[in-house]
Amino acid sequence: MKVNKIDGSSNIDEVAYDNFTMYLFVKFNSGATYRYEDVPRQVFDRLMESDSKGTFLNINIKKNYAFEKLDDDFEFPKPIRGLMEAFSKMKPDPRWAW
């Protein structure tokens, strides 16, 4: 999940989208983070292409998708820098030995 810093927005600080769960995460400049559920990828793409992210969020997302305010200490997951790095950190499982 890539976290997108929103520069120049008076309302939104960061946005992230999870393709698997269809969750849209929005961190506001106030520090509050919300998770919007079942948001289609096309809606996220349109949000990112919009001139005003805050206006798009208010008109097209807030009223149309279920949401939850997340804990104040919520942090976006750190992305894994590729599969090889992830595999290199795995410990061998003795059950897989021949």
Image (spheres, rainbow, N blue to C red):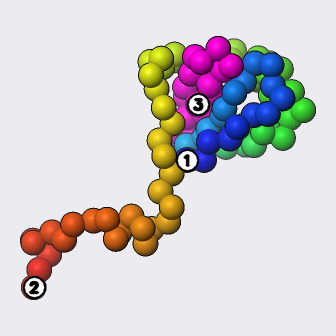
User: Can see residue 47?
Assistant: no
For mark 1, give the secondary structure: loop
Task: Please report the bounds of the magenta region as a residue range.
Answer: 21-40
- Residue 24 is situated, as x and y percent measured from the top left of the image, at 60, 33
For mark 3, give the secondary structure: strand
Report how far apart the C-alphas of labels 2 and 3 lie in the structure. Answer: 44 Å
Circle 3 residue: 25
Determine the residue positioned at 62% across, 25% down.
Answer: 27
Q: Is residue 28 left or right of residue 58?
A: left
Binning the other alpha carbons within 10 Å of mark 2 as few (below 14), some (14 to 19) or many (20 upward) gives few
Three-letter amino acid code at disc 3? Phe
Q: Nearer the viewer, residue 23 or 78?
A: 78
Q: Quadrant of the C terminus?
A: bottom left
Three-letter amino acid code at disc 1? Met
- Residue 75 is situated, as x and y percent measured from the top left of the image, at 48, 32
Image disc number at residue 98? 2
Residue 40: quarter of image: top right
* 23 in the magenta segment: yes
Residue 52, placed above or below residue 1: above
Three-letter amino acid code at disc 2? Trp
Q: Is residue 87 left or right of residue 52?
A: left
Q: Residue furthest right?
A: 51
Determine the residue positioned at 31% across, 65% down.
Answer: 89
